[in-house]
Image (tube, rainbow, N blue to C red):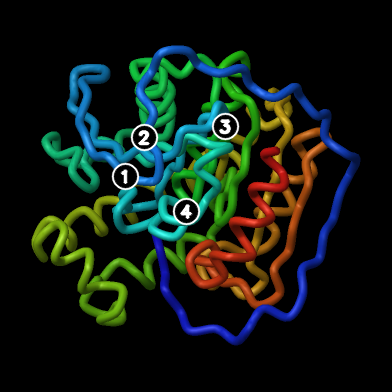
Amino acid sequence: MFWRSAGRALRALALLQLQPPARTAPLPPRGPAACYGTSVTSAKIQVNGVYLHYQQTGEGSHAVLLLPGMLGSGQTDFGPQLKSMNKQLFTIVAWDPRGYGKSIPPSRDFPPDFFERDAKDAVDLMQALKFEKFSLLGWSDGGITALIAAAKYPNLIHKLVVWGANASVTQEDVRIYSGIRDVSKWSEKVRKPLEELYGHKYFAETCEAWVDGISRFAENSDGNICQQLLPDIKCPTFIIHGEKDPLVPQAHAEYIHKHIKGSRLLLMPEGKHNLHLRFAKDFNREVENFLC
């Protein structure tokens, strides 16, 4: 999911920290795999019975996977990261989850385990691309997917960054989701690129299906999505939250921070849901410092 909203200039960054996360040694070079320099390549690869689209750039030894939000893709969600993150230090991969972006077919659906399915697809994609270990940068739904992947595949995940993510769904969240169900009410700035990517019918129907799918988590005990998995996340974890995020209340970021031992929480006072786009330079700098 992404939400481009106008915002004033970033005034400050507030850093909360339970304790410094353990630092791991830099990843060794990953061998004879091709280098991509400053160009961005695009391809598809078969993973778990579907053809997943991804973009790749950089030639660094530290592999990073970017995970988009609802209806998102590498193209729509991570332009400033694909363009400007340090390509000498990192090899950056941005994927389109099944049913999103250019990973169609299949059409997107939302069974009860769709986040777990995305987590397995993401990890298996990186292994198919011959990355033995990698870091995850997950936004919104992609942040939930990244949390699950880090908990379930700890030996593969180097470091974790999430923003705009939640480990549960409250009744307040359901009310917020209902407010974006009708895409005709979205601003043209947000709606137009998605309509161009998907066509109006697929875009509108998939958004409605997403609202139904994620709202069902509110029926679980405590609205659980992946709360029970958070203590299993052992890699260094960085949580970022925009204090003006209209879609994800700050309590979600604080809950994730509290339940992942050693995690760091960064609050961006002027940040909204799309803080990595609106304040790309500051975001990229904070994330690169954490990953290095």
On screen, residue 171 versus residue 207, left or right, reads right
Drawn side of residue 222 relative to residue 30, left or right: right
Whole-percent x, y for residue 65 in the image: 46, 36
User: What residue type is disc 1 on?
Assistant: Val
Q: Residue at x 69, y 23 (%)?
A: 232
The answer to the question of whether label 3 and label 4 lie on touching residues, with beta carbons closer than 8 A, is no
Q: Secondary structure at mark 1?
A: strand
Residue type indicated by callout 2: Tyr
Does residue 250 sit above or below 167 in this rendering?
Answer: below
Please report contact status of discs 2 and 4: CB closer than 8 Å, yes or no: no
Tell me the SS state at disc 3.
Answer: strand
Q: Quadrant of residue 50?
A: top left
Tell whether label 1 touches label 2 (CB within 8 Å). yes
Camera-side mark, 3 or 1: 1
**Is the residue marked by circle 2 packed among few (<14), some (14-19), or many (20+) residues within 10 Å?**
some
Q: Residues within 10 Å of mark 4 (few under 14, many from 20)?
A: some
Q: CA distance from mark 3 to mark 1?
A: 19 Å
* Residue 85 horizontal/vertical position (percent): 52, 50
Q: Earlier in the sequence, mark 2 or mark 4?
A: 2
Residue type at the position of mark 4? Gln
Q: Which residue is mark 3?
A: 135
Q: Nearer the viewer, mark 3 or mark 4?
A: 4
Position of the C terminus, as image quadrant, is top right
> What distance separates the C-alpha of mark 1 from that of mark 4?
11 Å
Q: Image quadrant of residue 228?
A: top right
Q: Which residue is mark 1?
A: 40
Tell me which numbered mark, 2 or 3, is placed earlier along the sequence: 2
